[in-house]
Image: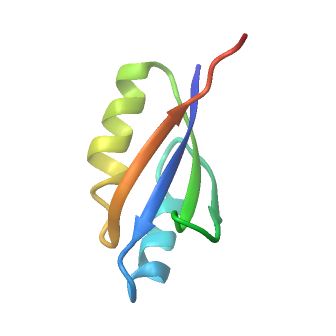
Amino acid sequence: MVRGYVLLRLVPGLEREALNSLRVLKGVVEVDLVFGHWDVVVRVEAKSINEMTRKVVTEIRGVKGVEATETLVTTEF
């Protein structure tokens, strides 16, 4: 299992639509609004790094209102 956090910047005025779309995506575990450089933190789970890549690139970035992303993949030490 691959877990990660995707930081999102949203287009002003499209926040509600984007949040509703993100919350129903398969593999999206949690969606939190935050203050600061980023607008939203999305916790994502996938079976592999390839699946995580597809999910971020095609699904999350494809949501109307998502302007930019940064993905943080978790690891164990």
Would residue 60 appear left or right of 73 to someone viewing this image? left
Name the image quarter holding the C terminus: top right
Would residue 42 appear left or right of 68 to someone viewing this image? right
> How many numbered marks, from 0 up?
0
Name the image quarter holding the N terminus: top right
Q: In the depicted view, which residue is nearer to us: 26 or 6?
A: 6
Q: Residue at x 29, y 42 (%)?
A: 57
Q: In the depicted view, which residue is nearer to us: 36 or 14?
A: 36
In this rendering, the answer to whether 20 lies above or below 77 is below
Q: Residue at x 42, y 31 (%)?
A: 52
Q: Quadrant of residue 23?
A: bottom right
In this rendering, the answer to whether 12 lies above or below 25 is below
Q: Position of residue 53 (x, y in %)?
A: 35, 31
Residue farthest to the right, as pictured: 77
In this rendering, the answer to whether 77 lies above or below 70 is above
Would residue 45 appear left or right of 12 to someone viewing this image? right
In this rendering, the answer to whether 12 lies above or below 56 is below
Q: Residue at x 49, y 82 (%)?
A: 16
Q: Position of residue 7 (x, y in %)?
A: 50, 52
Residue farthest to the front, as pictured: 37
Q: Position of residue 36 (x, y in %)?
A: 59, 68
Residue farthest to the bottom, as pictured: 13
Image colouring: rainbow
